[in-house]
């Protein structure tokens, strides 16, 4: 493992990842925590980023619980207060991503 080669003690590593990207594919993060003993993961949303739906947080929490890794995962994210706010935020993210891909942002 790369961390062994550079002399980083496994227990001293905290990985950070975008919550939205982790929700799209949590498998690599599950494997990473499995391969680096005592490491931790912080899932976050960026400043100014729309809030995430609560069901997204629950889905990720369940994935890490199922793998027995939930105690090593923390969240620093803004969560939508309502279903309406969640749908509005997701629409904004998807529209922004589409416009960015088309070069309009």
Image (cartoon, helix red, strand yellow):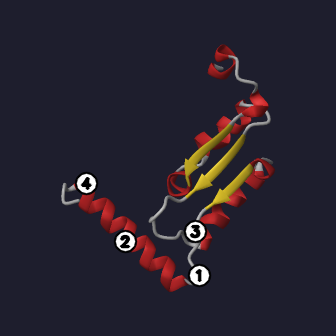
Which residue lies at the image location 25% right of the left edge and 54% below the top edge? 101
> Disc 4 versus disc 1: distance between alpha carbons?
29 Å
Task: Count neighbours of disc 3 (C-alpha within 10 A) and say few if under 14, some if 14 to 19, many if 20 or more.
Answer: some
**Quadrant in which the C terminus is drawn:** bottom left
* Residue where numbered disc 4 is placed: 101
Q: Which mark is residue 78?
A: 3
* Placement of 37 over or under 77, stated as above or below: above
Task: Count neighbours of disc 1 (C-alpha within 10 A) and say few if under 14, some if 14 to 19, many if 20 or more.
Answer: few
* Residue where numbered disc 1 is placed: 81
**Which tag, 2 or 3, sits closer to the chain's start?**
3
Task: Residue 23 in the image: state x and y as whole percent.
Answer: 55, 56
Secondary structure of the residue carrying tag 1 is: loop
Secondary structure of the residue carrying tag 2 is: helix
Q: Are marks 3 and 1 in contact (CB under 8 Å)?
A: no
Q: Are marks 2 and 4 in contact (CB under 8 Å)?
A: no
Task: Count neighbours of disc 2 (C-alpha within 10 A) and say few if under 14, some if 14 to 19, many if 20 or more.
Answer: some
**Which tag, 4 or 1, sits closer to the chain's start?**
1
Task: Residue 41 in the image: state x and y as whole percent.
Answer: 67, 46
**Which tag, 2 or 4, sits closer to the chain's start?**
2
Task: Residue 42 in the image: state x and y as whole percent.
Answer: 65, 50
Q: Which mark is residue 92?
A: 2
**Which tag, 1 or 2, sits closer to the chain's start?**
1
Secondary structure of the residue carrying tag 4 is: helix
Task: Residue 86 in the image: state x and y as whole percent.
Answer: 50, 77
Task: Count neighbours of disc 4 (C-alpha within 10 A) and say few if under 14, some if 14 to 19, many if 20 or more.
Answer: few
Closer to the eye: label 2 or 3: 3
**Nearer-the-camera pick, 80 or 47:** 47
> Disc 3 versus disc 1: distance between alpha carbons?
9 Å
* Placement of 33 over or under 88, stated as above or below: above
Q: Are marks 1 and 2 in contact (CB under 8 Å)?
A: no
> Disc 1 versus disc 2: distance between alpha carbons?
16 Å
């Amino acid at each position: 493992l790369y961390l062994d080669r550079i002399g980083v003690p496994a227990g001293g590593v905290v990985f950070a990842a975008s919550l939205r990207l982790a929700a799209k594919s949590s498998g690599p993060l599950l494997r990473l925590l499995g391969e680096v003993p005592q490491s931790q993961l912080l899932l976050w949303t960026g400043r100014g980023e729309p809030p995430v739906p609560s069901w997204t947080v629950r889905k990720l929490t369940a994935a890490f619980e199922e793998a027995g890794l939930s105690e090593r995962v923390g969240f620093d994210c803004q969560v939508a207060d309502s279903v309406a706010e969640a749908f509005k935020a997701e629409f904004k993210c998807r529209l922004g991503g589409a416009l960015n891909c088309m070069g309009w942002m």
